[in-house]
Image (spheres, coloured by chain):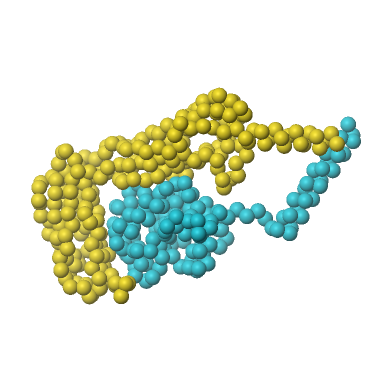
Chain colours: A yellow, B cyan
Amino acid sequence: MKSLIILSCLLLAQLSIAAGELTFKNSNMAVSAAADAKKIEVLFPFKNKSTEEVVVMRYDAPCTCMSAQLKGGTPISKDGPVRFAPGEEGVFKGVFELGNFKGTVDKKIVVWAKGDAEENPSIMLSTKVTIPYLIAAFPQSLLWNIGEELKPKVITVKVDNAEPIKITKHSCSSPQINYTMETVKEGFEYKLTVTPKSTEKVLFAALRLTTDSDNPRYKSVQTFITVKPNKKK
Amino acid sequence: MARWIYQTLALLALSAGAAVAVYLVIGPPDRSVHCVPAELKEDHVCLATVLGDWEGDVLWVDARGTVEFSKGHLEGAILIPETDTDNQIAIPENMEKIGMSGVNGQKLVVYCATDACGSSELVAKKIRDTGFHSEVYVLQGGWKAVLASEQKMKVVR
């Protein structure tokens, strides 16, 4: 009988601990990074506004390009769970290594509180990261269907920056492509006129433009050329 | 005191017996990643659909980092990390594999570490933007889903 009472008490204690909750000022952040940023840091401050203790069992940034840190609370063991008493504050920090990344992507930090199932963490902290395209091709790809007339198609390359970014070199991965590059406005706009030598065979190629930018993120622009069967037929 | 110990031991024995019975009747715990096709975002796919309906005949694209890829990846997968997607796609062998898989009617499925990594959506979009392949999907659950069903797939380590 005594055992039953002890086990019941333990169970109730467990349930009461799981009932606590961390309140975040914002769990969905939108961040714009500078064009030359190598990494960005995002902070998710929170407070335990419940009347119960909350234990953060573990947290993870599932992308290799992101790492997560937790500040505050009382560690129960080294690199183990961290306890947050009622009223206590803390902060999760996400560090996102940008590499040559451009565009917009969603990154998350996943947090398991005590009582969370492995497949169902109770806290998900999202960051929408946007890194500008200072130079981009429109469209980025050209398509000819097999047997299509050999008409040239055009790609326009535009620079969206106060300072010019000049195209210094261009090359194509396939000798089966004819192309010319025309400078519309040096450092700001270029026009590529592309024609495959034949539309009889399947072809996948990349037209690579190299710029004078010191920033590796904008050092090259890739455009893609395809000749393939029309599946809609 | 002795009675209390006996009672506790009896309770533990009963619990262990129940656990063994459940294991024998139902089997080991299901560690597969929860995935319901009707609940998926557009262009996401369950591993069960890939292995079942599509019979595993897909081109896999690994959107994780080089280190993770070298530790283990699906057989035949090509590595296209999100931090340098355009340049990685433009590698001639990658262009050929991606393009020809589309021409041959093979679907392309991108995976990253988990649902939360966000890399596979980006890589999938970039591949679609090349025009090389039009049937590009994101694997729900990512590498975590692969590991949970590893016995049904070929993982290169």
Q: Residue at x 15, y 68 (%)?
A: A151
Q: Residue at x 21, y 40 (%)?
A: A214
- Specify whether A5 is left or right of B84: right
Q: Is residue A53 above or below residue A142?
A: above
* Observer able to see residue A157: yes
Q: Residue A53 location, x and y as percent?
A: 61, 29
Q: Residue B129 location, x and y as percent?
A: 30, 57
Q: Residue at x 37, y 46 (%)?
A: A105
Q: Is residue B148 above or below residue A92?
A: below
Please tell me which residue lies in front, A55 or B12. Answer: A55
Q: Is residue B157 above or below residue A30?
A: below
Q: Residue B98 location, x and y as percent?
A: 35, 63
Q: What quarter of the picture does the N terminus of chain A occupy? A: top right
Q: Residue furthest top?
A: A87
Q: Is residue B94 above or below residue B6?
A: below
**Residue A153 in which image quadrant:** bottom left
**Residue A226 in which image quadrant:** bottom left
* Observer able to see residue B143: no
Count of numbered tags: 0
- Specify whether A224 is left or right of B125: left
Please tell me which residue lies in front, A76 or B72. Answer: A76
Q: Residue at x 30, y 45 (%)?
A: A102
